[in-house]
Amino acid sequence: MLPKPRRRPVELVAARPLSPATRELTFAVTDGEPFDYVAGQWVDLEVDIPGFVAEPGKRAYSIASAPNPSARDRFEVAVTRVEGGPVSTALHSLQIGARMPTVGPSGLFTRERAPIDAPSVFVGTGTGLSPLRAMIQDELSVRPEGALMTLIFGCRTEQDILWREEMQDLAARYARFRYEITLSRPTPAWNSRRGYVQSHLHELVDPAQPVHVYICGLTRMVTEVRQVLKEELKLDRKQVHSERYD
Ligand SMILES: Cc1cc2nc3c(=O)[nH]c(=O)nc-3n(C[C@H](O)[C@H](O)[C@H](O)COP(=O)(O)OP(=O)(O)OC[C@H]3O[C@@H](n4cnc5c(N)ncnc54)[C@H](O)[C@@H]3O)c2cc1C
């Protein structure tokens, strides 16, 4: 059962840059009750922006961290600064201690419906990695051994890679987790995968297995990945799960 969304007060308790355009924000719910959610869900943040016509600026952000039993009031998000975008710009300059309402958790983009022993492939670009990171952290903490989990993360350049050390560390610690990065605008020195995520699916998704694929990012990428999975790899739609940001 997924928890019902509720309006709750939150405070920004930590923040750090993840890349030149992306900021990680850690929020704590301040009403004294735990914030229960399932990995993959999202929250609406209601940011007070002076002069903004549709005040307050309300936007959805995927929860980027797995539920943490020792900090049940907390959750992380990662925000891409969109050129001219009022809410993402405001969240990039938000000061520690800032308070705002949030509504959540919401969303059905979770691993609840997939069999435990099915291999998983996670396909994310940019901050589309956020809910996938929460699912991967959650699954590895509960079942360190089990079916193969493959993450293919795409971004433009090396400096845009999000949570790289953390993902590399997980891949080194857990045999069941495979981590792949592809860059669409790499420097000549980059000696790994190149191009868009969709061009690597044939190699990383084995249609002979009962694989479940989780895709998150902007609509164009999600549509193209779904098309390859359906038309070329012949996956059933029940095996494909996605979340779109625009
Ligand atoms: C379910 C859901 C979860 C989301 N989770 C996240 C998240 O975890 N992190 C995040 O940064 N955004 C996320 N978004 C997008 C977010 O809600 C806002 O749309 C985004 O922050 C832009 O808001 P804005 O007010 O700055 O700009 P706006 O003026 O509202 O948006 C301008 C345009 O920016 C584009 N855009 C939206 N999101 C992105 C993005 N991430 N990268 C590049 N371009 C984008 C869209 O084309 C949009 O039309 C999510 C959206 C949905 C629906």
Image (cartoon, rainbow, N blue to C red):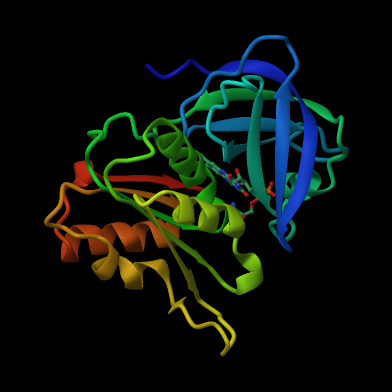
> As rendered, which of 224 and 186 lies closer to the eye?
186
Q: Please indicate whether residue 47 sits to the left or right of residue 182 in the image.
A: right
Q: Please indicate whether residue 79 sits to the left or right of residue 185 in the image.
A: right
Residue sticking out furthest to the left: 208
Q: Is residue 9 something one can see in this rendering?
A: yes
Residue 116: x and y, percent?
26, 34
In this picture, is 65 found above or below 9? below
Q: Quadrant location of residue 76?
A: top right
Q: Quadrant location of residue 193?
A: bottom left
Q: Please indicate whether residue 170 sits to the left or right of residue 230 in the image.
A: right
What residue is rendered at 44% in x and 50% in y?
A: 216
What residue is rendered at 68% in x and 32% in y?
A: 45
Residue 50: x and y, percent?
88, 38
Residue 224: x and y, percent?
34, 63
Q: Is residue 246 something one can see in this rendering?
A: no
In this picture, is 161 found above or below 69? below
Query: Can you say which quadrant of the picture contains the N terminus?
Result: top left
Residue 163: x and y, percent?
60, 54
Q: Please indicate whether residue 48 sits to the left or right of residue 3 in the image.
A: right
In this picture, is 78 found above or below 224? above
What residue is rendered at 51% in x and 23% in y?
A: 37
Residue sticking out furthest to the bottom: 188
In this picture, is 110 found above or below 172? above
